Image: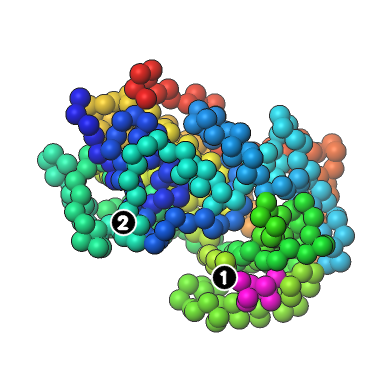
Amino acid sequence: MRERDVVVSGASIAGLSTAFWLRRLGWQVTVIERAPAFRDGGQNVDVRGVAREVLDRMGLFDEVKRQNTTETGTVVVDASGKVTAELPFDGPGGPDGATAELEVLRGDFARTIHDHLPPGVAFVYGDTIETATDGPESLHIVTSQGRELRCDLLVIAEGVRSATRDRVFTADEVTQDDLDVTMVFGTIPRTAGDDDRWRWHNTTRGRQIHLRPDNHGTTRAILAYSPGDDLARLGRGEALARVRDRYADAGWEAPRVLDAFDASDDVYIDQLTQIRMTTWHRGRTVLAGDAGWCVTPMGGGGASLALTSGYVLAAQLAAHPDDTEAALTAYEAWMRPLVDDVQGLPRGLKHFAYPQTRTGLALRHLAGKVLTSPPLKPLAAKLTQVAETKQALPEIPQGAA
């Protein structure tokens, strides 16, 4: 069999997982990344459900576990910082709660996969795909920097706002569902008052403040609110000024977070958007990760789905070596039930998570206490289980890898 070539667009979790497995299968792999260098930044992600088995098959379970953020559990706090509800992590072997056993920073996770790629994966930084034209024998790609590549497969793993996806697939095939939630993520200096728990504070007008420990001596902060603002067209300073206005009377650690965001070079603002598609492949082009099905932090499990998608895609290509269409169809058939389950947000979740009034906030606190009480702890743990499936992972045929 002739050697096959794949171009992977995007060097985060989905793209790196795809590169890992296809290179192990003997494909020639070229990864194109728009950033000028490998991106180490990012906030907390976790590895849950079936993705734990994928990670184990990669031989990276223990290595990723060593990158743990040090977070030991989750607490809800009031305006004075007093704990009103607690969601402890049960430890290895126990069920994951809001904090998972494999809780890791996106950059550390991506770096671990990158550093353990099989030899021979080529990276092209500072470039993007301009056109991708399917031909009778191969796919012809032209990049924004003028490179021309021919390949047997293009994997688009560019994330939720993928430009290549929007060029290859029609508007009727891509639904972008704005959840009306704005999130501001940033890295801020750690203080003596920060501990090893994820501290979560809700206040009125749909505002949340989150502080989470990391393994780099800093603290990861999130401001999340709904109704959200469309800040994408604003400059950084104007966008943060709008967020400051929104949190002017939020209390707790809001002033500290806002001041730190103004001084930080690691701040990211996002308007949460789910991606739903009628198909994830066309010809020799296929989607992986958030580009095909972004679940957003409200659904959780994005990194787990991204990691799993690279493995399942490779397994199906190995199972159908002479029929790309059959392989991509089988990939969709395996992944779609899992994705649909994670994307199915419970009715009323946003209203529960982002109460607008004092009455709503009081009900939210009461519900939190009830759900985290010992009798209902198993139910609370079940609510945080994502990327779980009864499907067996497809096997990569022995000798193929």
Q: Quadrant of the N terminus?
A: top left
Residue that sits furthest to the top in the current view? 398
Seen at 60% across and 51% down, the residue is 105
Which residue does the numbered mark 1 point to in the structure image? 265
Q: Tag 1, which secondary structure?
A: loop
Q: Position of residue 390 (x, y in %)?
A: 54, 26
Seen at 67% across and 63% down, the residue is 221
Q: Is residue 62 magenta?
A: no
Above or below residue 110? Residue 35 is below
Seen at 43% across and 44% down, the residue is 16
Seen at 54% across and 46% down, the residue is 109
Measure the alpha-carbon separation of dots 1 and 2. Answer: 28 Å
- Closer-to-camera residue (303/265): 265
Q: Position of residue 370 (x, y in %)?
A: 83, 46
3 on left or right of 44 = left
The residue type indicated by label 2 comes to: Thr
324 on left or right of 312 = left
- Whichever of callouts 1 and 2 sits on the residue coming sooner in the sequence is 2
The residue type indicated by label 1 comes to: Asp
Question: Closer to us: mark 1 or mark 2?
Answer: 1
Above or below residue 65? Residue 240 is below
Which residue does the numbered mark 2 point to in the structure image? 164
Q: Position of residue 367 (x, y in %)?
A: 79, 51
- Closer-to-camera residue (345/229): 229
- Closer-to-camera residue (92/95): 92
Q: Quadrant of the C terminus?
A: top left
Q: Tag 2, which secondary structure?
A: helix
The residue segment tinted magenta is: 257-265
Asked if disc 1 and disc 2 are in contact, CB closer than 8 Å, the reply is: no
